[in-house]
Image (tube, rainbow, N blue to C red):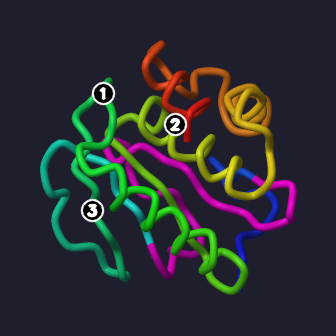
Amino acid sequence: MTWEPDTPGLLRLPSGRSVRGRGLRNPLPPGPTPAFGLYLRGSDPGAMAWESRWIRWPDFWLPTDRPAFAEALNDLLERSSQERVEIACGGGFGRTGTALACLAVLDGVPNDKAVGYVREHYSKRAVETPWQRRFVTRF
């Protein structure tokens, strides 16, 4: 059970796995819902209608618990082979883009190419700050 190719916000990884990125301030996109979501917010986003995990990550900054973030990304990557998964923050660009770039690194994209990969295949606005870009290169 994976995403349809025309799903809004879809990032296809080099392995063929796909992850939906989105902003929680926007309405839920039409179509199927995820089986699992990773939510990157400064405060708990609340319960979802599907299994989810929250990582504390203030807007424009970096995750406060980096080992937990890496563990959550590895779990999400594993799930993406069989389930619809998504990553979301408030707007869907900075924190979500940074997490997608780190996910691309886990999927085999070189660290120094991951931001460009996500900007090309997800959104030109992905990864908003210099420290988010640096975080990806050191992930």
**What's the mark number on residue 6?**
none
Label 1, label 3: how far apart the Cα atoms are:
16 Å
Q: Is residue 96 above or below residue 49?
A: above
**Secondary structure that dominates the magenta span:** loop
Which amino acid type is shown beneath numbered disc 1? Trp
- Residue 53's image quarter? bottom left
Depth check: give the residue in front, 6 or 132: 132
Magenta span has 2? no
First in sequence, mark 1 or 2: give its number.
Answer: 1
**Mark 1: few, some, or many residues within 10 Å (few <14, many ≥20)?**
some
**Mark 2: few, some, or many residues within 10 Å (few <14, many ≥20)?**
many
First in sequence, mark 1 or 3: give its number.
Answer: 3
**Mark 3: few, some, or many residues within 10 Å (few <14, many ≥20)?**
many
Depth check: give the residue in front, 100 or 105: 105
Residue 26 x/y as whole percent? 38, 43
Label 3, label 2: how far apart the Cα atoms are:
15 Å
Which amino acid type is shown beneath numbered disc 2? Thr
- Residue 49's image quarter? bottom left
| Residue wearing tag 1 | 61
Query: In the rendered view, does 110 fall on the left or right side of 88?
Result: right
| Residue wearing tag 3 | 54
Residue range corresponding to the magenta coloring: 12-36
Residue 62 x/y as whole percent? 33, 34
Residue 73 x/y as whole percent? 51, 62
| Residue wearing tag 2 | 98
For mark 1, give the secondary structure: loop
The N terminus sits in image quarter: bottom right
Q: Is residue 109 above or below residue 28?
A: above
